Amino acid sequence: MKKKESVKGNKSLAKWHFIAVLAILFSLATIGVAAGQSVSISPTSQSVDAGDTFTVDVTVDPAGYGVSSGSITVSFDATVMQVDSVAAGDLLGASPIVPPGFPKIDNTNGTVQVDLARSGTTTPPTAAGTFATITFTAKTGAISGTYGINLTSVGFADENFANIPGITINNGTVTVAGVSPPTPTVSIDPASQSVDAGDTFTVDVTVDPAGYGVSSGSITVSFDATVMQVDSVVAGDLLGASPLVPPGFPKIDNTNGTVQVDLARSGTTTPPTAAGTFATITFSVKSDAISETYGINLTSVGFVDENFANIPGITINNGTVTVKPAPVVTTITVSPPTATLYVGDTQKFTAIAKDQYGAVMTGIIITWTSSDTTVGTIDANGLFTAKAPGSTTITATNGTVSGTASVTVKAKTKYVGGGGRAVDSDGDGWSDSYEIRMGTDPNDPNSYPGAPTPTPSPTPTPTPTATPTATPTATIPPTATPTPTPTPTATPTPTPTPPGFEAVFAIASLLAVAYLVLRRKK
């Protein structure tokens, strides 16, 4: 009998143990359901055009909790969209309480905060529903892209006004079809240039952040070390007046042909950073550089934005430098190109030499020649002397390049003496009688009217000799010829006289003598 009671008691104990296990499992199941509470952006993704209005719901699944109140903060990109309005959902009943000053919409910093509370008693569990509906507008100038709508702060209270723990947050996105996004660029400026061997030149590494803020950057430039070398690097204006330079930078390697420049902004970075120069690099071209075009290439580029995040999608624009051939004489121009001279005249010629680029070359040795030295000769300084009537070509030469000028030399015989035949003792082309009248030396070939040499001093005018009084003889036959009376020497007049004046002058002198003789007879 006692044994039966013992068995019956064991069965009863096992029954209670089974009930206890079920209770524990039920409790665990309840805890598991409670752990599924979540707050989500709905829809999780959507696509709109720039200028469109769209809405998102903030939905809540209490997972068995009663919900008496809640507070959420949503963040968004204020450069792309703005919040227009907020409406309470059905989660907390038909007319939830809205605290004064809510919702708090900040379209400058891109946030909206919504606080709501249930009006009346909360009976758990609260059914899943919409906490709030937010209306956005995508800006007309929005850049195409996918943007986050994120729950940055979430808090809900249960029916006992205790915080509901372990809430899962599910954010959302919106894809805006707007304008094409600008692409950040890093470039070598100028993109190309030409220099001579031995020259010094500079290139700027310019940056267009395309709307990003730039807090720091690092670039590596490669070049041909057999042709050029880096002399110096100077920070530009992109990162402010006095950017920070890490120790050991810039790293110039003129053996392998690289230079690395790292710079950082000193102070806060406020986007957007204006386009500017990251660094200026000065190069020298070696004197024995071969004429060719060489690359100056950005082999490594990295920039960080205002949040110290890497700026993506940077376009790189490399540059070139062309080392020109050494300048050589290509053309020679002689001036004047033509000249007409008289025998004995001189003319100074000059020569201008230019290289293949059209630049005037100085210090060039010019060799002067005359094609006909009997007509005229030219010295090493380009001074031509006319020798005889005729034509000759003046040539200025440097190596295989030459320039020419034409010269015509004329005789100077312009006046003739009496009797129709000129007397020119010195062969300078001017008659002796005309040279005497003009005050030049008829026996000096370099002395003639209009000669480039200094005018000789005028010959003093001879003092007239007094005419002696002739005493007539006692008896003079009527036909006797009177004795010629000496006449004063006439002073040469500087006024030119026409050809034949000598004959006229002689006849006039004889008539004057005859006149004097006849006068004395009377």
Image (spheres, rainbow, N blue to C red):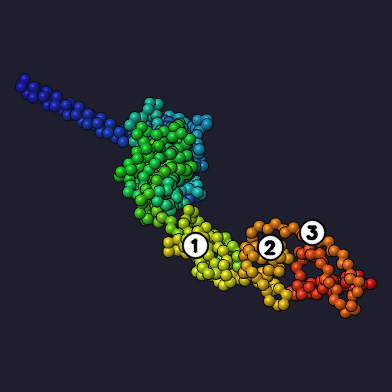
Q: What residue is rendered at 83% in x and 61% in y?
A: 466
Front-lying residue, 344 or 150: 344
Q: Position of residue 145 (x, y in %)?
A: 42, 48
From the image, state whether disc 1 or disc 2 is nearer to you: 2
Can residue 510 be seen here? The reply is yes
Residue 423 marker: none
Task: Find the distance from the CA under tag 1 to the CA under tag 2.
Answer: 33 Å
Location of residue 223 with respect to 435 vertically, above or below: above
Query: According to the image, label 3 marks what residue?
Result: 463
Q: Is residue 459 left or right of residue 340?
A: right
Instruction: Name the element at disc 1.
Output: strand
Query: According to the image, label 1 marks what residue?
Result: 368
> Quadrant of residue 509 in the image?
bottom right
Quadrant that contains the C terminus: bottom right
Query: According to the image, label 2 marks what residue?
Result: 440
Q: Is residue 119 left or right of residue 516?
A: left
Q: Is residue 292 left or right of residue 136?
A: left
Q: Which kind of residue does numbered mark 2 sit on?
A: Thr
Q: Is residue 448 left or right of residue 53?
A: right
Q: Position of residue 305 (x, y in %)?
A: 41, 39
Q: Earlier in the sequence, mark 1 or mark 2?
A: 1
Q: Position of residue 143 (x, y in %)?
A: 46, 48
10 Å crowding of disc 1: few (<14), some (14-19), many (20+): many
